[in-house]
Image (cartoon, grey):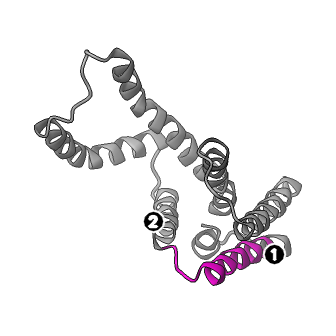
């Protein structure tokens, strides 16, 4: 996302930020070399999220109105999905299981509130800082997978992980020193 910020919003790249971007790039190419395959899903998610953030920062609309418009755009697809869930008798949204009903009712706010805060943060800062802060989510997913689900963690992934977090710290420290 920092590349989009640099290209479209003239966000400045000083030597520390360039070093952090190079470290992330080296980490990615290192994993590509070690595993010999391209992580297509990860790349698609990264680019689509970057484009989403670019569009959200480009379109001048309040955060809450923008999320409302996005939700209205997705509503027909959600209704079609709910129809097929109901027709195939996979509907768990019943009063027979109140604890599951409660958790399903929380799914909306638990999705919208963090997204609202994130989009508001993108509006207030730039794409570069939010791109670096975005590494928090995969880190938390890694910690959950490793400590809770006992997923394997190779030394190659550890090297890449360390390089990425060094880059994040360099970038965020540079942001902090600017303010």
Q: Is residue 31 magenta?
A: yes
Disc with the residue nearer the chain's start (2 vs 1): 1
**Above or below: residue 73 compared with residue 155:** above
Circle count: 2
- The relative height of residue 140 versus residue 41 in the rendered view (above or below) is above
Q: Is residue 21 left or right of residue 152?
A: right
- State the CA–CA distance, disc 2 to disc 1: 24 Å
- List the residue tagged with mark 1: 19
Q: Main secondary structure of the magenta part?
A: helix
Residue 49: x and y in percent read 49, 61
- Res 155 label: none
Looking at the image, residue 124 sits to the left or right of residue 66; the answer is right
| Viewer-proximal residue among 84 and 65 | 84
Read off the magenta span.
Answer: 18-39
Mark 2 = which residue?
Answer: 48
Left or right, 48 with respect to 155, comes to left
Label 2 residue SS: helix
Please provide percent x and percent y for residue 1: 60, 67
């Amino acid at each position: 996302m920092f590349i989009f910020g640099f290209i479209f919003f003239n966000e400045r790249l000083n030597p520390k930020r360039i070093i952090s971007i190079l470290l992330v790039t080296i980490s990615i190419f290192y994993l590509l070399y070690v595993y010999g395959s391209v992580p297509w899903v990860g790349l698609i998610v990264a680019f689509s999220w970057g484009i989403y953030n670019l569009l959200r920062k480009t379109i001048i609309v309040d955060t809450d109105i923008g999320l409302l418009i996005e939700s209205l755009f997705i509503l027909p697809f959600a209704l079609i999905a709910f129809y097929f869930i109901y027709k195939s008798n996979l509907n768990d949204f019943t009063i027979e299981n109140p604890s599951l009903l409660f958790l399903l009712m929380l799914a909306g706010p638990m999705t919208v509130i963090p997204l609202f805060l994130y989009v508001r943060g993108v509006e207030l800062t730039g794409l570069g800082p939010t791109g670096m802060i975005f590494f928090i989510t995969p880190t938390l997913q890694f910690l959950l997978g490793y400590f809770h689900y006992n997923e394997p963690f190779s030394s190659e992934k550890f090297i890449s992980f360390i390089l990425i977090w060094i880059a994040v710290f360099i970038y965020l420290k540079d942001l902090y020193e600017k303010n």
